Image: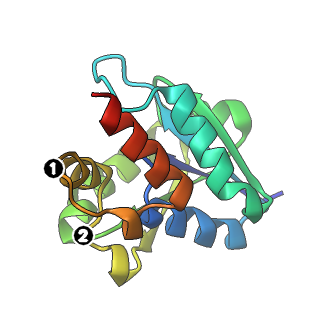
Amino acid sequence: MRRAVCPGSFDPITNGHLDIIGRASKLYDVVHVAVMINQSKKGLFTVDERIELIREVTADFGNVEVESFHGLLVDFCKQREIPAIVKGLRAVSDFDYELQMAQMNNGLSGVETLFVPTNPTYSFLSSSLVKEVATWGGDVSHLLPPTVHEALVKRLGER
């Protein structure tokens, strides 16, 4: 069985993330979406909320499993016998950082990293940018799955 992981914080998941996960789901039998737990950062959504949102928007793929992790991604991969990490690249600046991570991960465990160029429609997109624009009242509905957009608007209204 061919397995891969798409890691990230996904706070919140965007159409760019969803595009990469969807493309990976066509290449692998099982795609694990690993939601990073970072104790030093306070996310807009809790890890459990992010997991639930991701499960909702990836349900139609049929081969995506979503769970959280903390620590080294290679340990997550080793525990689940996942040989490949799939990462989307938006720009050359992403490549510089991701190449270092890929080489470190491979050196630590032999896990391979596959880089997928982002759909040009989403090349500028990040969760941070979406949150910032939405906080100031900008329309980000076209950048998020509808259920995620609803959750974002609701959460920002609670602040």
Query: Can residue 10 be seen from the camera position used here?
Result: no
In the rendering, at what x and y percent does residue 101 appear? 34, 47
Circle nearer the viewer, 1 or 2: 1
Residue type at numbered disc 2: Phe
Q: Determine the residue positioned at 44% across, 54% down.
A: 149
Residue ranking furthest to the front: 157
Say which mark, if any, is on residue 68: none
Say which mark, if any, is on residue 124: 2
Q: Determine the residue positioned at 46% across, 23% down.
A: 71
Residue on which the image places disc 1? 136
Quadrant housing the C terminus? top left
Residue type at numbered disc 1: Trp
Q: Badge 2 local density, few (<14 within 10 Å), some, or many (20+)? A: few
Secondary structure beneath dot 2 equals loop
Query: Can residue 17 be seen from the camera position used here?
Result: yes
In the rendering, at what x and y percent does residue 141 appear? 39, 64
In the rendering, at what x and y percent does residue 100 appear? 28, 51
48 w.r.t. 150: above or below: above
